[in-house]
Image: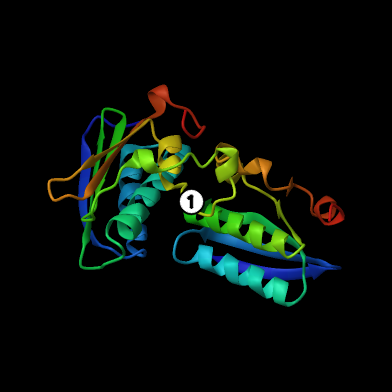
Amino acid sequence: MKSNIRDIGDTRIIELGGKITIGTGDVKIRELIAQALEEDKQNILFDLGGVTAIDSSGIGEMVACYTTVTKRGGQLKLMHLSPKINDILQVTQLITVFDVFDDEREAIGSF
Amino acid sequence: MNTNAKLQANLVLASRFENIEVAERALVDLCHRAGCEEDEEYWLVTALREAVANAVRHGNQRDPERLVRVAYLIDNSTVTIRVEDEGEGFDPSDIPNPTDPENLLRPSGRGIFYMRQFMNRVDFSPTAAGGTAVVMVKDLASNDNDRPGA
């Protein structure tokens, strides 16, 4: 899994690419969230535009990240879902949990 | 689809997460030879990865001495994948529905749900040695479409 971090104002944008899957990607996103919170970034946006696959462990870790950020008083939102990642969020009904955006400016403005 | 010929393969893997990639590559190769559509291949791979991950983690407890056996068959526009572990067995009915509101924020428990969504049939049974075998079946293009679980 690849990642890149950008900060725009108070928002930490974490661009993810490749597979968020068991044993690698799932651990990596946990570390990225821990780093953001350590740096006092509470508005966090996962840019999933480059993500090709998310298995159940990856989805589980995203849910765990959501819970961690929320408990710390922050917000975790998603952006740029591919049709297949959107399908996965639909069937798991996690689309009802996460705020999802297609437009970065709109996403940043939502925090 | 081009599944006039029967395509099959068998793998025996040590219980390591990196071997999920090996199982995936074998399936992708078979799908290419069979002429599967890209979306069909994607959801087949997704279900396979869950089955092998479950066998490694929950079945074999990540003990590399315990083996995971994967058997693939593409025949007459139907893909059948069997994944066996050497664990202690389990009752799939014990797994709560991850889409129930009280379970939505659980960080685990979606693997079997994934398999059932992306394949047409998923059956669990005990192996002779006491482990678990999962058999997953998906019908290809003639009676399927691009949506998961369709």
Q: Is residue B10 left or right of residue A75?
A: left
Q: Is residue A71 left or right of residue B82?
A: right
Q: Is residue B73 left or right of residue A81?
A: left
Q: Amino acid at mark 1?
A: Ser
Residue in the foreground of this view, choosing between B121 and B44: B121
Tell me residue B96's x, y (percent). 45, 41
Which residue is at a point 84% across and 50% down the rendered structure image? A106
Residue in the foreground of this view, choosing between B57 and A2: B57
Mark 1 Cα-neighbour bin, 10 Å: few <14, some 14–19, many ≥20: many
Tell me residue B57's x, y (percent). 35, 59
For the question of whether residue B126 can be seen, the reply is yes
Residue in the foreground of this view, choosing between B127 and A80: B127
Which residue is at a point 38% across and 42% down the rendered structure image? B94
Tell me residue B133's x, y (percent). 24, 44
Which residue is at a point 77% across and 66% down the rendered structure image? A42
The furthest residue to the left = B128
How was this image coloured?
A: rainbow
Question: Vertically, is A58 above or below B145?
Answer: below
Quadrant in which residue B43 is drawn = top left
Question: Vertically, is A53 above or below B144?
Answer: below
Which residue is at a point 50% across and 32% down the rendered structure image? B146
Quadrant in which residue A96 is drawn = top right
Tell me residue B86's x, y (percent). 20, 56
Q: Is residue A73 left or right of residue A51?
A: right
Question: Label 1 belongs to which residue?
Answer: A56
Question: Vertically, is A35 above or below B149?
Answer: below
The furthest residue to the bottom = A39
Question: Vertically, is A83 above or below B62?
Answer: above
